[in-house]
Image (cartoon, rainbow, N blue to C red):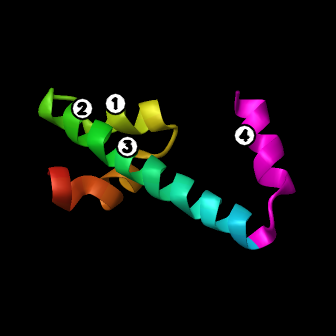
Amino acid sequence: MTTDLLTTAASAEPGDGLRAVRSLHELADRLEGLHVGRARALGWSWQQVADALGVSRQAVHKKYGKRFG
């Protein structure tokens, strides 16, 4: 299924493809925020969240610290 989506997106008009990419970024950001909030509510440390996302603790704290402090 992922291969089909990639093939379709790659053959789309550039504007259509770029809008699809933007939509995917927005969805991914919303999902990330949802799960970061859930992890923090369950007691996860910023380091645990960062490790799961493959980023530094500082990066995840900068992005979500005020929201899920």
The residue drawn where x is 62% and y is 66% is: 19
Q: Mark 3 vs mark 1: which is more N-terminal?
A: 3
Magenta region: 1-14
Q: Amino acid at mark 2?
A: Ala
Marks 4 and 2 close (CB-CB < 8 Å):
no
Q: Mark 2 vs mark 1: which is more N-terminal?
A: 2
Find residue 57 and name its label: none
Marks 3 and 2 close (CB-CB < 8 Å):
no
Q: Mark 3 vs mark 2: which is more N-terminal?
A: 3
The CA span between labels 4 and 2 is: 30 Å
The CA span between labels 4 and 3 is: 19 Å
Please state the horizontal and vertical placement of residue 39, each as a whole percent of the image: 24, 32
Q: In what element is the residue under mark 2? A: helix
State which mark lies toward you, 2 or 1. 2
Q: Amino acid at mark 3?
A: Leu
Q: In what element is the residue under mark 3? A: helix
Q: In what element is the residue under mark 1? A: helix
Q: Amino acid at mark 1?
A: Gln
State which mark lies toward you, 3 or 2. 3
Find residue 5 and name its label: 4
Marks 2 and 1 close (CB-CB < 8 Å):
yes
Kindly identify which residue carries mark 2: 39
State which mark lies toward you, 4 or 3. 4
Crowding around mark 4 (Cα neighbors within 10 Å: few <14, some 14 to 19, many 20+) is few
The residue drawn where x is 46% and y is 58% is: 26
State which mark lies toward you, 1 or 4. 4
Q: Mark 4 vs mark 3: which is more N-terminal?
A: 4
Query: Which part of the image, by quadrant, shows the N terminus?
Result: top right
Kindly identify which residue carries mark 1: 48
Relative placement, left or right, of 55 versus 31 is right
Kindly identify which residue carries mark 3: 31
